[in-house]
Image: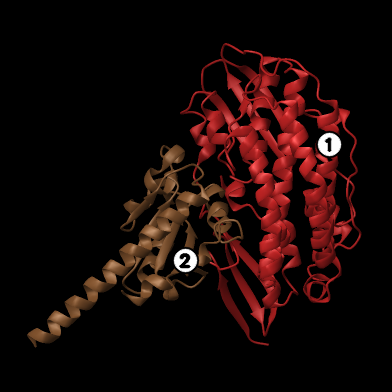
Chain colours: A red, B brown
Amino acid sequence: MKRTIVPFGPQHPVLPEPIHLDLVLEDEKVVEAIPSFGFVHRGMEDLASKRDFNDYLYVVERICGICSYMHGMAYCEGAERIFGVEIPDRAKYLRTIWCELSRLHSHLLWLGLLADAFGFEALFMQSWRVREKILDMVEDSTGGRLISSVNRIGGVARDMDSAMLAGFVAQFDKMESELRALTKVFLTDSTVRARLFEVGVLTKQDALLYGAVGPMMRASGIELDTRKLGYAAYGKLDFDIITSNGCDALARCEVRIGEIFQSFRLIRQAVDKIPAGEIYIPVSGNPKGEATVRVEQPRGEALYYMKANGTRNLERFRVRTPTFSNVYSLLKILPGAQFADVPLLILTIDPCISCTER
Amino acid sequence: MPTISKSPWMMHYDGSSCNGCDIEVLACLTPLYDIERFGVINTGDPRQADILLITGGVNYHNESVVKQIYEQMPTPKVVVAVGICACSGGVFKDCYNIKGGVDTTIPVDIYVPGCAARPESIIDGVLQAVELLARKQTEAESATAAEGEAQ
């Protein structure tokens, strides 16, 4: 059959971010997808050599506006390892709470975008309505809705008092019942199932072969979560790794919804267990040495490498973000898919192009 | 009163933003902020758009795309630079791949500050854009009328 090439992006109604794919089609079926990147590349790793290592924290937080908090936290963890300081316990718990709030808002954002991608606008609005409450909590506790800038090398800059924490937890019950209603629509509604069930299948072998990370990998039946390494206060908290053997778009949706409820569970535990005490210890001097940090972002595992040579600038800063790893899986699931499913499949990896290209 | 002020269509494009402002632009469409109450609809098609919202500074790879989108839009058109990166390059100004703010590539009418720009300020920017759009349309109409009389 004659082949057609359809350019997809960089400006596309479904994607908030620019990504370009050349889709090779046979009739309505995708045969091959050829990606091209660079529309959001800024050159932030190079900026490490121009900025003071303390200032560079604010640049790192802007690698991505959605997982901004986790980027900042990972950078601080790396710097703390180089300096060899152990931050106070209270700061670790505060970091965990903010991390889980970020995960909640990121997963709710994804659920909304997914609903928008298959044309269910009411579901998009409902998901984002719940998300706004999470953003209000982030704003109450940090002062910023998305970019919070509360991390410091040596701890955190702001504390949350017990009244504020109790106030957050008090809202969770209502939010959970609202989310259960949404879950029912996402997982059992026949129109949603028709778009998601057995679409974009990535088998367990392929997930391993192509190095999928995060919910994409867990939806293919691999039980792995970087949080189990126990960074911040995760080592002292109890949570389940959500997996599914569905391997399709519906399974990815199911895993992310499961993770939302685990995040509520984690925050509840952290609020119960949080110790009193200092939130920051001063760190002085210039760093010398290298550190590697792995954190579990909403989209999967991110790896940071830092090398410092005793001057005020870092010698090298490198990030390997989850979307970078998941693009290979995306290119695996696109061939064979229907053309109309392409935006949906791109969304199921939860792409964050600004992370990927930096 | 020009008809366009009651139902302008808006389009969003990401110059090379960190995603923060993009998400806040989307948040403007959701129930809490609901920009559609002003008659503004988000469209994905530049040929149907009156207002262009650009987030993030422009990088060298994206420059031609931004220009193309701007040229595809029908006149009168208004460009809103959302966020400090779109206004001046912001924290990425010194990056080797960043050309600068959006005004280095296409003419910008409204600048919305903030990192990330708050939905309230984005809505304020869009409403100013709507007024400007109405003014541009009136000017264009009177210019056409004057031309007609001269003939």
- How far apart are the alpha carbons under marks 1 and 2? 40 Å
Q: Work out whether residue A209 can be spotted.
A: no
Q: Give the letter of the chain under mark 1.
A: A
Looking at the image, residue A52 sits to the left or right of residue A295; the answer is: left
Against A2, is A85 above or below?
above
- Kind of residue indicated by mark 1: Arg
Which of the numbered marks, if any, corresponds to residue B37?
none
Which residue is tagged 1? A268
Q: Give the letter of the chain under mark 2.
A: B
Residue at x-position 68% and y-position 82%: A28
Instruction: Farthest residue to the left: give it.
Output: B150
Rendering coords of residue A208 (x, y %): 84, 52
The quarter of the image holding the C terminus of chain A is top right
Mark 2 is surrounded, within 10 Å at the Cα level, by few (under 14), some (14 to 19) or many (20 or more) other residues, namely: some
Which of the numbered marks, if any, corresponds to residue B38?
2
Rendering coords of residue A266 (x, y %): 83, 38
The quarter of the image holding the N terminus of chain A is bottom right
Do labels 1 and 2 touch, CB within 8 Å?
no
Residue at x-position 61% and y-position 39%: A139
Residue at x-position 85% and y-position 41%: A265
Residue at x-position 51% and y-position 44%: B116
Against B75, is A321 above or below?
above
Rendering coords of residue A329 (x, y %): 75, 58
Rendering coords of residue A254 (x, y %): 84, 59
Q: In this rendered view, identify the residue nearer to me: A289 or B112.
A: B112
Q: Secondary structure at mark 1?
A: helix
Q: Secondary structure at mark 2?
A: helix
Q: Quadrant of residue A18?
A: bottom right
Q: In this rendered view, identify the residue nearer to me: B54 or B142.
A: B142
Q: In this rendered view, identify the residue nearer to me: A142 or B93.
A: A142
- Kind of residue indicated by mark 2: Phe
